[in-house]
Image: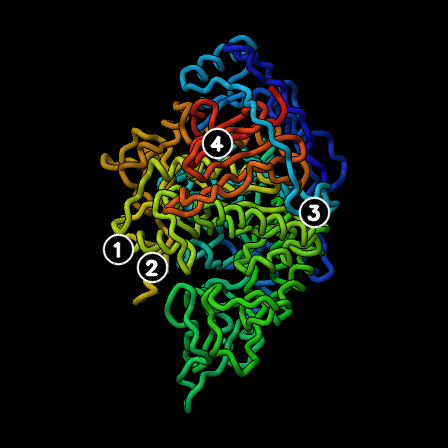
């Protein structure tokens, strides 16, 4: 695996009141010729693989780059691509052979980066840029000055300071999550699609991300937003075709952007041919062995095998016509696979190979902690199925985070390591923090999400603890940390930080209660929420490891709380009852606003769909989305989008070794109840191995920054001090 090239930060400083600027080339993407063939992906455990295609090359000048750089591009296209899974056409019929074998703002800018216009600017003169930079800093009160306070870095805990030999490109990448149905609609169907992603690839390039992660786009009845998969080796016809996918891959790779796809191995759709075959074949059949079927309790088997409730509400067992019951940990339309069945193992090895052969660079594994199960025990009723309710630290829960799951991922590692470069993976594993590292071991998936960061309230203690746990897990697993503020499953970060920061027995409980009441139970202080979200961005992106950005996060979108109940799509809204009633996750899945003037009140969709669309967006867009439309933020140098671009591009210049971090003396609590909602305030302050430091102030008193050159701030400094709910990036020791 080729490694990213480290670059020295160009010198940018201030002389008196006039900034002295030396241009900085954009962070070069990895280039260089690659001569190795793309290997076949044959695996010991799976014999259905076919050879992959050879990679091709393309020379492309990055926007503003001083010279062309070479990119490694998958050679797959409409002609000559490897297609190990051909078969039954479109719809919900599978294309994998194993499925067919049986019937069955913004801040101080001290650097140059791509233009915020719709097209990258080229040939910008040095003095023109310098003058523009000076004017911008004067206009926004952001003349950069050196800070006299001198601090010494101190090691709080031992951290790894050298890159592991197992590091992949994913170990320090900035990755953008796309929820395809809500990103961009190219056809006018009201659903975002694969071609829509391709249309916006220049936007993604300008943003500065290095990879995109696509939530499921497979054929699906869409009972659970595509996480009910009917065919793991095709594209939902409503979202496009495999040719569209190939075009999207080519467009991403041509811009140096890698592609990650979602794999859903815990369950399938009930429309998957395997499940249909299982229902037809009856009890005791090989077809039923692929799923978890059990006889019921009671005199006539009329009672479910256990008393479990599913994660989305309702019972976890459904009875079929012949009297048996099947397990579904989520909705009845999502039957759980039985991973004791060898055919299930072979199926997913084949799925990994299929997408790897098409040029996919990595995988996100859904419900990674749920595959292995033990239902042959007498104490099942004392356990809870709902994720996280009774997690244990020894791998003996009958449903979650069992030790046996790791053998599955070692098997998968043998599959993805057959490729050159090896495919990367990250686990969605909602497990106890002390067990996160198990999934991230190099012999398994290689990374796991640090959800403690996303679960934390905006308080010093919560955020500091989440950082410590994330770094610790990475060191224990010889992997890299991952940082997540938002995704498709949780309320948007700007809203969470705009609501009262009260720690509840369940994470995000305040936000969930607010959503249940259509946003009326608490005041949503959007100004405060945006300020904190801006600060959190810099805090996150300066940390060692990879960072994930959820679509719309870069626009500063808030959660849409008042979607009518009749318009909701999330099964949580219909399946939950009583004290566990929830409105669901649709508020963070509303289609993105691209064009402010395209008013939905006049039949528009904020540019989500073409002007001649046949259908409205699948979820209603609120009028206030106009203020956050991408084209409006493109024109505003103080917007959230501008800050994201600044931070993401600068991060590519600054990042150092994996897992290196030293706490500064400035780091610590204030000893006062001056944080959010009366929590103890404090300052999180740390440095990286190359002298890059981040300071975030949670307390009421402005903080004097360490000596050095201020690179970027989330909000303007006041007399050179960092205000509450603000972050700053500094190059220590440089004036």
Closer to the chain start, of discs 2 and 1, is 1
Closer to the chain start, of discs 4 and 2, is 2
Q: Residue at x 69, y 31 (%)?
A: 5
In terms of image quadrants, where is residue 365?
A: bottom right
Q: Is residue 336 visible?
A: yes
Closer to the chain start, of discs 1 and 4, is 1
Cβ–Cβ under 8 Å for marks 2 and 3: no
Helix, strand or loop at mark 2: loop
Image coords of residue 443 (percent x, y): 71, 55
Image coords of residue 396 (percent x, y): 59, 72
Helix, strand or loop at mark 4: strand
How much space separates mark 3 and mark 4, taking CA atoms? 45 Å
Give the crowd class for mark 4: few <14, some 14-19, many >=20 residues within 10 Å: many
Say above or below: 606 vs 329.
above
Helix, strand or loop at mark 3: loop
Cβ–Cβ under 8 Å for marks 1 and 4: no
Asked whether 39 or 703 is in front, the reply is 703
Give the crowd class for mark 3: few <14, some 14-19, many >=20 residues within 10 Å: many
How much space separates mark 2 and mark 3, taking CA atoms? 41 Å
Image coords of residue 289 (percent x, y): 57, 74
Instruction: Write down the residue under mark 3.
Output: 422
How much space separates mark 4 and mark 2, taking CA atoms? 40 Å
Instruction: Write down the residue under mark 1.
Output: 566
Instruction: Write down the residue under mark 2.
Output: 582
Closer to the chain start, of discs 3 and 4, is 3
Q: Is residue 563 visible?
A: no
Mark 1 or mark 4, which is nearer to you?
A: 4
Asked whether 269 or 240 is in front, the reply is 269
């Amino acid at each position: 695996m080729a490694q990213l090239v480290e670059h020295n930060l160009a010198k940018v400083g201030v002389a008196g009141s006039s900034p002295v600027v030396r241009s900085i080339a954009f962070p070069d993407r990895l280039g260089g010729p690659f001569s190795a063939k793309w290997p076949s992906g044959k695996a010991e455990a799976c014999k259905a693989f076919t050879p992959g295609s050879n990679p091709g090359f393309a020379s492309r000048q990055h926007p503003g780059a001083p010279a062309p750089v070479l990119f490694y591009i998958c050679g797959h296209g409409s002609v000559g691509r490897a297609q190990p899974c051909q078969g039954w056409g479109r719809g919900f019929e599978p294309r994998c052979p194993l499925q067919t074998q049986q019937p069955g703002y913004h801040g101080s800018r001290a650097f140059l980066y791509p233009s915020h216009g719709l097209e990258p600017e080229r040939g910008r003169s040095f003095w023109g840029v310098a003058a523009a930079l000076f004017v911008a800093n004067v206009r926004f009160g952001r003349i950069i000055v050196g800070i006299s306070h001198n601090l010494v870095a101190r090691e709080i805990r031992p951290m790894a300071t050298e890159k592991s030999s197992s590091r992949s490109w994913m170990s320090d990448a900035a990755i953008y999550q796309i929820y395809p149905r809500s990103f961009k609609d190219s056809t006018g169907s009201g659903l975002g699609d694969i071609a829509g992603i391709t249309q916006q690839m220049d936007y993604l390039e300008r943003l500065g991300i290095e990879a995109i992660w696509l939530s499921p786009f497979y054929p699906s009845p869409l009972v659970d937003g595509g996480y009910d998969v009917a065919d793991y080796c095709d594209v939902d016809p409503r979202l496009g075709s495999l040719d569209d996918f190939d075009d999207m891959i080519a467009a991403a790779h041509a811009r140096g952007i890698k592609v990650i796809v979602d794999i859903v191995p815990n369950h399938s759709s009930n429309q998957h041919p395997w499940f249909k075959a299982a229902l037809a074949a009856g009890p005791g059949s090989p077809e039923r062995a692929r799923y978890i079927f059990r006889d019921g309790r009671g005199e006539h088997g009329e009672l479910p095998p256990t008393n479990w409730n599913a994660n989305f509400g309702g019972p976890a067992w459904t009875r079929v016509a012949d009297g048996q019951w099947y397990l579904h940990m989520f909705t009845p339309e999502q039957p759980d696979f039985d991973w004791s069945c060898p055919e299930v193992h072979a199926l997913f090895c084949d799925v990994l190979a299929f997408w790897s052969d098409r040029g996919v660079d990595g995988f996100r594994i859904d419900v990674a902690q749920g595959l292995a199960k033990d239902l042959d025990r007498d104490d099942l009723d004392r356990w809870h199925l709902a994720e996280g309710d009774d997690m244990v630290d020894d791998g003996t829960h009958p449903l979650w985070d069992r030790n046996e799951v790791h053998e599955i991922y070692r098997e998968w590692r043998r599959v993805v390591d057959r490729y050159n470069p090896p495919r990367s993976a990250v686990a969605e594993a909602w497990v106890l923090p002390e067990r996160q590292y198990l999934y991230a071991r190099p012999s398994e998936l290689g990374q796991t999400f640090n959800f403690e960061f996303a679960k934390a309230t905006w308080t010093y203690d919560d955020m500091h603890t989440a950082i410590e746990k994330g770094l610790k897990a990475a060191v224990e697993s010889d992997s890299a940390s991952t940082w997540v503020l938002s995704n498709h499953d949780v309320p948007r970060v700007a809203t969470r930080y705009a609501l009262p920061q009260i720690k509840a027995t369940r994470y995000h409980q305040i936000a969930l209660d607010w959503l249940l009441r259509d946003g009326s139970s608490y005041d949503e202080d959007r100004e405060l929420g945006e300020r904190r979200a801006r600060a959190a961005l810099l805090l996150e992106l300066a940390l060692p490891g990879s960072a994930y950005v959820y679509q719309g996060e870069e626009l500063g979108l808030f959660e849409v709380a008042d979607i009518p109940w009749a318009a909701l799509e999330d099964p949580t809204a219909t399946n939950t009852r009583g004290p566990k009633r929830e409105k669901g996750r649709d508020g963070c899945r509303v289609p993105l606003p691209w064009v402010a003037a395209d008013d939905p009140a006049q039949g528009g969709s904020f540019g989500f769909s073409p002007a001649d669309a046949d259908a409205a967006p699948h979820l209603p867009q609120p009028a206030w989305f106009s203020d956050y439309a991408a084209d409006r933020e493109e024109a505003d140098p103080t917007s959230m989008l501008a800050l994201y671009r600044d931070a993401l591009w600068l991060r590519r210049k600054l990042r150092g070794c994996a897992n290196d971090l030293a706490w500064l003396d400035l780091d610590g609590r204030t000893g006062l109840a001056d944080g959010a909602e009366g929590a103890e305030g404090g300052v999180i302050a740390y440095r990286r191995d190359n002298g890059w430091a981040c300071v975030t102030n949670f307390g009421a008193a402005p903080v004097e920054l360490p000596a050095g050159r201020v690179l970027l701030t989330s909000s303007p400094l006041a007399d050179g001090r960092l205000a509450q709910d603000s972050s700053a990036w500094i190059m220590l020791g440089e004036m």
